[in-house]
Amino acid sequence: MNRYLPAFAFLAVAAVGAAMTVVVFRAEDASTRLHFARIADKTVERIDDRISRYLTLLQATNAFFTARDGAVSKSEMREFVTALDLKNRFGGILGLGLAKLIDAGDEAPIEEELSERYGGPRPVWPAATVARRTPIVLLEPLDRANEAALGYDMFSEPVRRAAMQRALDTGEGAASGPVDLVQEITGEKQGGFLYYLPFPDQLTMSHRVSRSEPPTVEGFIYAPFVAADLHREALVGAVNLPLVIETRDVTDGGETVLFQSDDFAEIAATSMFTVNRDLNVAGRIWSIRAYATVEFLDPSRYWRTGLLALSTILLAIAAAVLVRLQLKAIRTAHEMQAMTEKTVEDKNLLLQETKHRIKNSIARILAMARQTAINSDNLEEFSESFESRMQAMANAQDMLTESSWRRAALRDLLQAELNQVFGDRIPEEALDGPNVEFGETAAQALGLTFHELATNAMKYGGVAEEDGTLSIAWRHEENGDRVTIEWVERRPSGSDSADPASGAEANAKEEGNTPSSGFGTRLIDASIRFELNGTIKRSFGSSETRISISIPLNDMDDEADQT
């Protein structure tokens, strides 16, 4: 469970940090949205201000006509409009004009007036569709586009008629819905709208009986607007606006597009911020929708969120590392405590084992000393025999010590004892067999056994003579559970030591005992049969002595592991 604590610490700190980051992000996002809303509101205000200025211009035009009692000539109108400089100061307005309100059938005086004012026949068009008509009788500036609109009966078109009727009903100015302007004589027509301001009959106003009576409307002061040009004019000076807009006329559920910024559809599809505002334009409702561009969506606006997120990650990592280091310190302390306890335990075990080994070694040394003394004729013989046997034990101890008291190789045991007895007389090729290793008890027992066999071979087996040989081979048997050692001594024929008795028999004869009662024989038998649970067979011939030793390996392996 402890190994998951760093991850838990990281997740816990990260979760708290993430919650704080979300709070900060939402605050920054709300601030950013509010900032964008202010930019969008200022943009809508610019459009509204521009429209208000234009409508004020029509009020001024109405005042101009009123001051002239409605009698404004073509030249006076041209002079007035020229002074206004519509093209440079009021972009989006195509002109200022007057449309008279007449009954259907009264077109003749209007056509005559148009002919006198502009020269040539100027019919009222198109044909009448309703009882009243509003032909355009005066329009400036008189360019090709505006000249094409002279005589046009705006009351014949439903959208224009609805705006004029609203102006008649309210006595106030009214904007029309989106229309195709008749001034648009090119192939690519721009959408627009018109603004109508009722112009009363001044003569009727001056002679009416009661001031409460509504004046008679003579016609309309009007202006045609190109919606796109009006929007662009309104946004002049607002350079690098970080938004795009779309304006729709949504009066009475309509959805007619009046204006769209460049790349509006592409930006709107991916923008994160949008603002909707409604604008009342002389009785018409315009819906203006603004979308933020990539210039506004600057990631640096969220630097607090980024800083907090980075700090949270670093803090979470630091917490995880700190917990991991703390756990590692605790684990190290536990391991050191366990190591200390193990060291004390190993020390006690080593002391007990050393005590046991020393006790066993002393017992074996005492037994060898006692038996060697019994079978020795003098002190010199005792010393030599006892020293060689002690050396055999020491050799086995050295091999065990080199392997940390785990294993001693059979070949190494044989080589050590043969070198002690024969020097380099026995070549390495005389030893043949697989790698076999023994534990402490088996190594010491075999070391003594090989020492006794080598000593007997040198003294009585003729191996020390020039043509005498000794070969030792071993092999695994019973599926590797036992090892059999074949010790073969060969004497040259006719040698002085060709007595068929060798090894144990010679040793027994020297001691004046039966073959089974000699110390060397008893030491070998005790080592093989009793200590190692093995068997030993001896075969004596006139030229050869063969000794076969079979030892179980499993018991020795167990003993080695226990040691």
Image (cartoon, rainbow, N blue to C red):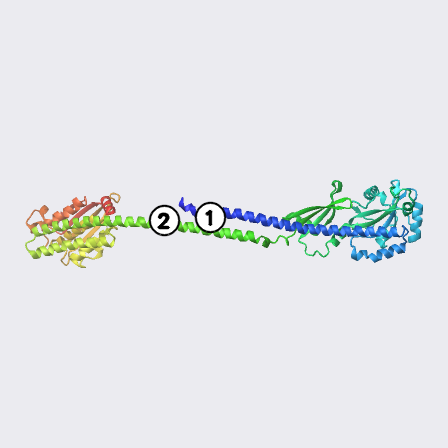
Camera-nearest residue between 209 and 88? 209
Q: Callout 1, which amino acid?
A: Phe
Q: Secondary structure at mark 2?
A: helix
Mark 1 burial class by Cα count in 10 Å: few <14, some 14-19, many 20+: many
Identify the residue under disc 2: 331
Left or right side of 526 for 311: right
Q: Callout 2, which amino acid?
A: Arg
Camera-nearest residue between 213 and 103? 213
- In the image, what residue occupies the spot 11% across and 56% down? 384
The spot of residue 263 in percent (x, y) is 69, 51
| Labels 2 and 1: the sequence-earlier one | 1
Camera-nearest residue between 271 and 23? 23
Left or right side of 259 for 420: left
Left or right side of 256 for 317: left
Q: CA distance from mark 2 to mark 1?
A: 20 Å
Q: Secondary structure at mark 1?
A: helix
The spot of residue 200 in percent (x, y) is 87, 46
Camera-nearest residue between 523 and 21? 21
The answer to which quarter of the image holds residue 233 is bottom right
Identify the residue under disc 1: 10
The spot of residue 348 in percent (x, y) is 23, 48
